[in-house]
Amino acid sequence: MRTIIVTALLAGTIAALAVPPLAAADGGAAVAARTTLTGRRAVPKGAPHGRAHASLKITGRRVCWSIRGVRGIGRPRTASIYKAIPGEFGPLMVRLGGRYRGAGCVTARVGVAEAIAQSPEGFYLSIATRRFPLGAVRGQLRRA
């Protein structure tokens, strides 16, 4: 009986030690990411001379952003985070507000912010305009 209890405790301890990145993304430490967005990276092609810079801070389910230096795309309508590798179009994961704002915070669905925090390279940020509704500029996220 003691062997079973000790084995269960040991397994639980090992499992707890194996999850620090998720635990940090889930509530404790913030994870920072950034990107440079361009029209050439957008899929399908976006504004040819479009450019912007963005930084994200993910704490638990909270995703905060700051987008600066937006130029060459006209008037932004929305900014969103999608899941996809470079060159691919992917599903919408987090809409950064109802309308475009250069900075703010939103609460993501359960598991989404954690997934972005663990592997930002698998996600991209896109800014849409009236002329480019699928994205005028796009940038693949990376750890800051």
Image (tube, grey):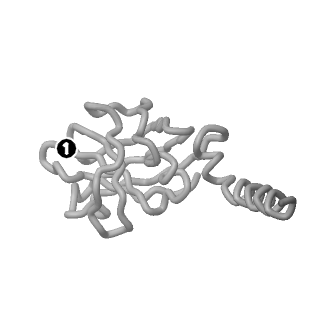
Label 1 crowd (10 A; few <14 / some 14-19 / many >=20) = many
Residue at 81% over, 57% down? 5
Amino acid type shown at disc 1: Thr
Q: Which corner quadrant holds the N terminus?
A: bottom right
Residue reaching furthest to the left: 131
Front-most of 104 and 102?
A: 104
Frontmost residue, 89 versus 40: 89
Q: In which quarter of the image is residue 94?
A: top left
Tell me the SS state at disc 1: strand
Quick check: 31 above or below 42? above
The answer to whether 108 appears left or right of 28 in the picture is left
**Residue at image location 21% in from the left, 63% down from the top:** 45
Q: Which residue lies furthest to the right in this view?
A: 2
Residue with the mark numbered 1 = 129
- Is 136 left, or right, of 29 in this rendering? left
* Residue shown at 45% from the left, 37% from the top: 66
Please tell me in which quadrant of the rendered image residue 98 appears. Answer: top left
- In the rendered image, residue 127, in percent from the top left (x then y), is placed at 29, 46
- In front here: 3 or 17? 3
Residue at the spot x=47%, y=38% of the render?
Answer: 63
Instruction: Locate residue 110, reporting x and y percent.
Output: 44, 42
